[in-house]
C-alpha cells in the first residue's frame, strides 16, 4: 500500500535536493503555531518521546527537540532526512531523523507519548487513511497524543492539494481507537501562493 499517489511521491523524492527550502510551498521556516501553544501550555514537555511523521525539513522536530522532547522525525525522502539532520546540527539539537514510510514506521509499538503529523495526512490517498490511523495508534502508548495539522475545506477555493473535511478526519481517527480532545480551524502563517491558510488542528488521545 502506497500512502501517496506516485506523482506526489516523485515530487517529494526530488524536491528537497532540487529546490531551496524557501521555494517549497509548505515551508515558512516556523514551527507549527498550535505546537508552539502546546509547549507554552505544558501539553508538550521535556522528556516526552515524540515521533514526527513526514518530518520534511525538520522545523517542528528541531523546535520540539530544543524544548527538551526526545524527538524522531520520519520521512520517506532521503534528501529531506539529510536537510533535517543539517538543520538539527546547525541548531545543536539532538533530534534524530530516519528514512521511513508513514504506513510502516521502523519504530517499536507503543513507544511514543506524542505523534505529530504536519501536513501529511491531507495528501494521502483515501485507501491509505485507515492503515495510517492503525500505524499512528500502534506507535502511541495508551493515552498518548496524536496532533494533526491539515489543510481544511475552509480554505479559499483552488487551494489544496486536498481540502479535508472534519468528517473525513473524524471518520479516520475513529472513536473506537482515539478520543477526540479537540478539532478546530485556525489561521496559519500565509505563504506567497496560499495567503488564506485556514488549517485544521486535531488533538486525539489513543485509547
Ligand atoms: C507537505 S510536506 C510536510 C513536511 C513537514 N511536516 C512540514 O510541516 O514542514 C509532506 C512530507 O511528507 C513526506 N512524505 C510523503 N510520503 C511519505 C511517506 N509515505 N512516508 C513518510 N513521509 C512521506 C514528504 O517527503 C514531505 O516531507
Image (tube, grey):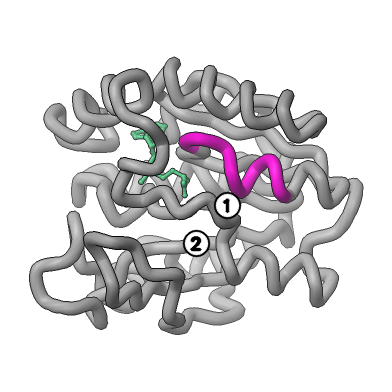
Depth check: give the residue in front, 157 or 115.
157
Q: Residues within 10 Å of mark 2 (few under 14, many from 20)?
A: many
Depth check: give the residue in front, 23 or 116.
23
Q: Find residue 59 and report its image quarter.
A: top right
The residue stretch that appears in magenta: 56-63
Depth check: give the residue in front, 82 or 143.
82
Q: Is label 1 within 8 A of ligand 1 (CB to nearest ligand atom)? A: no
- In percent of width and height, residue 68 lies at 87, 47
The answer, for residue 141, to whether it is visible in the render is: no
Residue under pointer 1? 116
Point 12% across, 31% down: residue: 7
Residue under pointer 2? 148
* Horizontal side, residue 141 vs residue 193: left or right: right
Circle 2/circle 1 CB separation < 8 Å: yes
Depth check: give the residue in front, 68 or 194.
194
SS of the residue under disc 1: strand
* Horizontal side, residue 70 vs residue 124: left or right: right
SS of the residue under disc 2: strand
- In percent of width and height, residue 165 lies at 26, 75
Q: Quadrant of ligand 1?
A: top left
Amino acid at each position: 500500500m502506497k500512502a501517496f499517489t506516485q506523482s506526489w511521491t516523485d515530487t517529494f523524492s526530488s524536491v528537497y535536493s532540487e529546490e531551496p527550502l524557501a521555494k517549497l510551498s509548505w515551508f515558512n521556516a516556523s514551527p507549527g503555531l498550535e505546537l508552539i501553544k502546546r509547549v507554552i501550555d505544558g501539553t508538550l514537555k521535556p522528556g516526552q518521546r515524540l515521533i514526527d511523521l513526514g518530518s520534511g525539513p525538520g522545523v517542528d522536530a528541531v523546535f520540539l527537540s530544543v524544548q527538551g522532547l526526545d524527538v524522531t522525525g520520519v520521512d520517506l525522502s532521503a534528501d529531506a532526512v539529510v536537510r533535517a539532520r543539517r538543520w538539527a546540527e546547525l541548531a545543536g539539537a539532538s533530534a534524530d531523523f530516519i528514512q521511513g514510510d508513514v504506513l510502516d514506521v521502523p519504530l517499536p509499538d507503543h513507544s511514543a507519548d506524542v505523534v505529530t503529523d504536519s501536513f501529511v495526512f491531507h495528501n494521502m490517498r483515501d485507501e491509505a487513511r485507515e492503515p495510517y490511523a492503525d500505524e499512528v495508534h500502534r506507535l502511541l502508548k495508551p493515552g498518548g497524543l496524536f496532533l494533526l495539522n491539515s489543510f481544511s475545506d475552509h480554505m479559499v477555493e483552488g487551494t489544496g492539494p486536498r481540502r479535508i473535511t472534519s468528517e473525513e478526519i473524524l471518520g479516520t481517527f475513529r472513536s473506537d481507537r482515539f478520543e477526540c480532545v479537540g478539532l478546530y480551524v485556525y489561521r496559519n502563517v500565509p505563504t506567497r501562493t496560499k495567503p488564506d491558510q485556514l488549517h485544521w488542528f486535531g488533538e486525539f488521545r489513543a485509547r
